[in-house]
Image (cartoon, grey):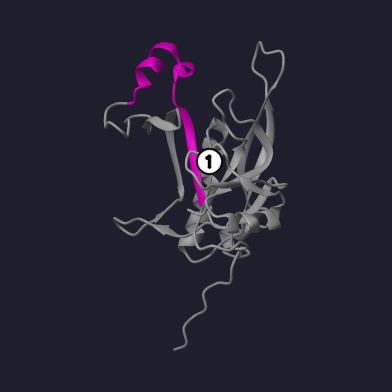
Amino acid sequence: ELGRFRAGGEKTEKAPGRKLEHWRVTSASRTLLEAVAERYGGKVEAWENARDEGYWQVFTESSEVHGMFPPIFSDVDGTPTVPLSQFFEEWTGGSCQRRCDGVTEIHTGGPCLCAAAIAKGGEEARVCKPTTRLSFMLPVLPGLGVWRAESRGWNAAAEMPGTAQVLQQAAAEGRFIPMTLRLEQRTAKKAGEQHPRRFVVPVIDLPQVSVLQLANGETPLAINPPRPRPT
């Protein structure tokens, strides 16, 4: 993992990180972030409140980055897997207290701790937040590795897996389709609320690809296709 793309500002003990219009990128490599800043704008600065020492950050001037998915295969049977994970998680003091798949709490191996509360008080009683993590590559930047984007919202949890599955299947076949990871500003207003709630959702977009191209295998590639070996 080379670094992370974040939709929020720095968190402190007194206040949560504010939602951003443009990507904030963090990494332990200042050299990599200099390349990010040159490509997407912003200035590299020390990340003073990082959990570990020696980290840097850049508040970019872009809400979109262009990359591709790496091919990842199962260690068990070699089948293609998606570089995307989803769990319900509770974080306190910089550490994960709970992580479950809705049935089993991963840390303890016991049942989901929110299940009883939800059965009594409904979904609003859930303590853990849906957490979606996505790994992707940026071929225009230096570094051999993946970058990670993370979201703790229901919209991203519902929307990102479908497109991610399409991209990963193509990567497993040696076709690296260009994708755009975009921050989308949205509003929602529930019954009884006076003002709409504003939030940010990371969205995977395929601006150069149509459904017909996907069906015919005629999609534009992010990198050159593998050349056949001479016989």
Q: Nearer the viewer, residue 76 or 4?
A: 4
Residue 157, given in percent of the width and then of the height, sits at 52, 36
Look at 72% across and 17% down and name the residue there.
195
**Residue carrying label 1:** 150
Look at 47% across and 64% down and name the residue there.
173
* Helix, strand or loop under label 1: strand
Above or below, 22 relative to 65: above
Above or below, 173 relative to 29: below
The three-letter code of the residue at mark 1 reads Glu
Q: Kindly indicate the quadrant of the structure image that contains residue 203.
A: top right
Above or below, 228 relative to 164: below
Look at 38% across and 21% down and name the residue there.
114
Q: Which residues are magenta?
A: 112-135
Residue 58, given in percent of the width and then of the height, sits at 64, 47
Above or below, 74 relative to 193: below
Residue 109 as seen in the image, left or right of residue 222 = left
Quarter of the image containing the C terminus? bottom left
Residue 98, given in percent of the width and then of the height, sits at 37, 29
